[in-house]
Image (cartoon, coloured by chain):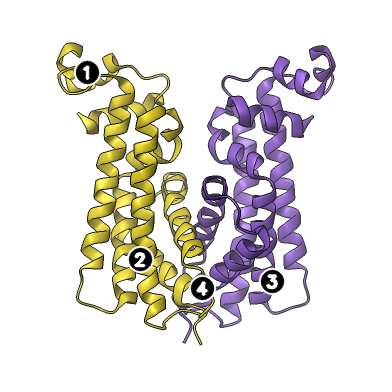
Chain colours: A purple, B yellow
Amino acid sequence: MLEAAIRVFHKKGYASASIQDVADEVGVLKGSLYHYIDSKEDLLARIFEDSAGRFTAMLDEAGGLDERPVERLRSFGRACSLWYLKNIERVGIYATEWEHLTGKRRKEVMVIREAYERRLAGLIGEVKAAGETAPELDVNFATYFIFGALNGLPDWYRRRGPDSAERIADAYADQIVNAVVGGAR
Amino acid sequence: MLEAAIRVFHKKGYASASIQDVADEVGVLKGSLYHYIDSKEDLLARIFEDSAGRFTAMLDEAGGLDERPVERLRSFGRACSLWYLKNIERVGIYATEWEHLTGKRRKEVMVIREAYERRLAGLIGEVKAAGETAPELDVNFATYFIFGALNGLPDWYRRRGPDSAERIADAYADQIVNAVVGGAR
């Protein structure tokens, strides 16, 4: 159901799409969807929660590796870039439609988002604590810088076409690490 | 007029805003605006052209500095970050509303955008040609990576608040340079 909603929201835009469109895409009656969700906004919130869960899982996995902090960061950078490239539609919705969430749902999504931003900041903080960055590195600015670079992927990838996702993910992982450790002396 | 339109589009969203709203913000009759523009979409296209002009000017200025390529890149990174931070509303429109442009106007905006992406790629290419990057650096990927990081600025800056724009711009300029030269041996 989430995958169908992602395709529909991507194609028509969240604002113009209806629950009926999603039901048509799944191939069920609209009433059946209402067993699982209570509104279109609920569906959008589910997409966000599900995506945030994947982020958290990627951060967990990279953070749990028995390697130097800088290699844990590289591993997250690579995994996250690949995930973005394989979920272009979902990430596009994530980037542009969150303003359609209101009230409690919007607050929840912001809380989850800040939680995984703090997780990435933690990973970068470990690289800094290991003495592998410039001493003046601002961990928060680096976190936002990196998320910005990642969030920009779907847009140009869609425009440009046929680069290998693996090549891009390797390049992005290197640039993420470089952005963080590059100024070390 | 453009500044008024930016405020209105930012506040109401482009889709919900009307030429009447913009006229009210400027403090003139709607008819007066039609001397200068022929539609709301025309106004949006003007905002884009004007912003792209500033990008090009920043790239010209940095590219014309009598310094090493890496310092020209740092200078652009700093100037562009500062400009983003001082034009949060405009950049937000740039990032989210371009899909509302149609036909010829959309094509024009894409052409301009690709032109300044190529300019930044040129600046990065000079850093590479000077032997200051890893030999395997992909100049195009680095260009998109950097634009992504810059485009992400308005969103978190609005959420987080009171960091000094100068401190952020210095940090971003360093991270931009690091992302490009960090892997050099």
**In the displayed structure, does residue A50 sit left or right of residue B59?**
right
Instruction: Identify the residue at image location x=80%, y=24%.
Output: A26
The residue that mark 2 highlights is B122
Is residue B175 shown above or below B145? below
CA separation in Å, label 3 and label 2: 32 Å
Instruction: Identify the residue at image location x=63%, y=76%.
Output: A70
The residue that mark 1 highlights is B23
Which of pointers 1 and 2 lies earlier in the amino acid sequence? 1
- Given the image, what chain letter belongs to the residue carrying mark 3? A
Instruction: Identify the residue at image location x=56%, y=41%.
Output: A95
Q: What element carries label 4?
A: loop
Is residue A143 shown above or below B10? below
Q: Which amino acid does label 4 sit on?
A: Leu
Residue B136 vs residue B59, the one in the foreground: B136
CA separation in Å, label 4 and label 2: 13 Å
Instruction: Identify the residue at image location x=67%, y=38%.
Output: A48
Q: Do labels 4 and 2 share a chain?
A: yes
Q: What element carries label 2?
A: helix
Can residue B155 be seen in the rendering of this structure? Answer: yes
The residue that mark 4 highlights is B137
CA separation in Å, label 1 and label 4: 49 Å
Q: Are marks 1 and 2 on the same chain?
A: yes
Label drawn at residue A72: 3
CA separation in Å, label 3 and label 1: 54 Å
Q: Which amino acid does label 2 sit on?
A: Gly
Q: Which amino acid does label 1 sit on?
A: Ala
